[in-house]
Image: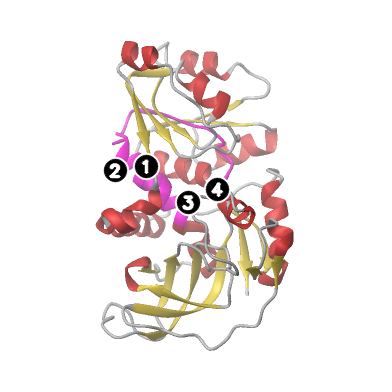
Amino acid sequence: MVVRELGGPPALEVEGLENLSVGPGEVGIDVKAVGCNFFDILITQGKYQVRPELPFAPGAEVAGVVSDVGEGVDRFSRGDRVSALLTYGGYASAVSAPADRVFPMPSKMSFEDAAATGLVYQTSHVALVHRANLRAGETLLVHAAAGGVGLAAVQIGAALGARVIGTAGTKDKLDLVAHNGADFVVNYREEDWVARVKELTDGRGADVIYDPVGGDTFDASTKCIAFEGRILIVGFASGRIPSAAMNRVLLKNFSLVGIHWGLYFDKDPKVLHESQLALSRMYAEGKIRPVVSETHPLKEAKTALAALGSRKTTGKIVLVP
């Protein structure tokens, strides 16, 4: 599914795939499932930080079977079940990926689960463990907790032994968040969630706040962060990139911690491979399980991204070639 002009998801077109070329250091994959993410919409609009030359296919998360391996690749063989995390190009029935972006799948994991686990779970795991050093017994507040990265953060936080508070805007989403490990849920549309977080923490506030929303949500989060707490800057789904009132940062000794997950492939890929191993163990132990709310044929990628852009979905949407 390719974009020939930057017109958003409606610009996606079906294109026949030529024979796959697998170069040195690459792995060819017959794709069985593709994960959808909000930035797939942005990249088709030219609003994402990655701006490929036209034409291109969006898509960062794929899972499938190794079809070929390039020169110098010894970690994988034909027939291996793998997932891969790409810069873009995943909306396809076959891809080639650099070997360091390919990961073995747990033996009992489905392709749909693998495609839904990759980016959002790695983002949340690296954020919570590597960047925020979340510890058992601490309180974790997760915003947009019914979304892809939000549910992953809730499950991982619970698996790490944290006390998890999740926010969402409807009863169905709140029920989903509670079902996935949150100790408390808060309807941000109906409650003063800042006051509720303070109430649930006896006035202390949350030790770690996971914020993929930005805007007003970030501004209010600075009012309920604990002393020496950490606010994770995950994204800006609200559309507004906020600025911090530095006097609040000073007065509470809290930290603003960025998580640009993809940068680790260039700066320190070992972090991502260690994260994936930890996630595979969590999955095998039944501590995490991706929520796949919808599957669509790859050719219906426009429909899938329209549903994702409506913000009415929960969990992950997956495309199947």
Nearer-N-terminus badge (2/4): 2
Residue denoted by label 3: 120
**Residue 185 in view, yes or no:** no
Q: CA distance from mark 1 to mark 4?
A: 14 Å
Q: Say which residue appears at 31% left-offset and 39% top-offset.
A: 131
Image coords of residue 75 (percent x, y): 28, 77
For disc 1, the neighbor class at 10 Å (few under 14, some 14 to 19, many from 20) is many
Tell whether label 1 touches label 2 (CB within 8 Å).
Answer: yes
Which residue occupies 52% across, 44% down? 151
Q: Which residue is mark 1?
A: 127
Q: Are marks 3 and 4 in contact (CB under 8 Å)?
A: yes
Q: State the SS at label 1.
A: helix
Q: Which residues are magenta?
A: 119-148
Residue placed most toward the observer, 261 or 295 = 261
Q: Quadrant of residue 253?
A: top left
Q: Which residue is mark 4?
A: 148
Identified by mark 1, the residue type is Ala
Depicted 212 relative to depicted 31: above or below? above
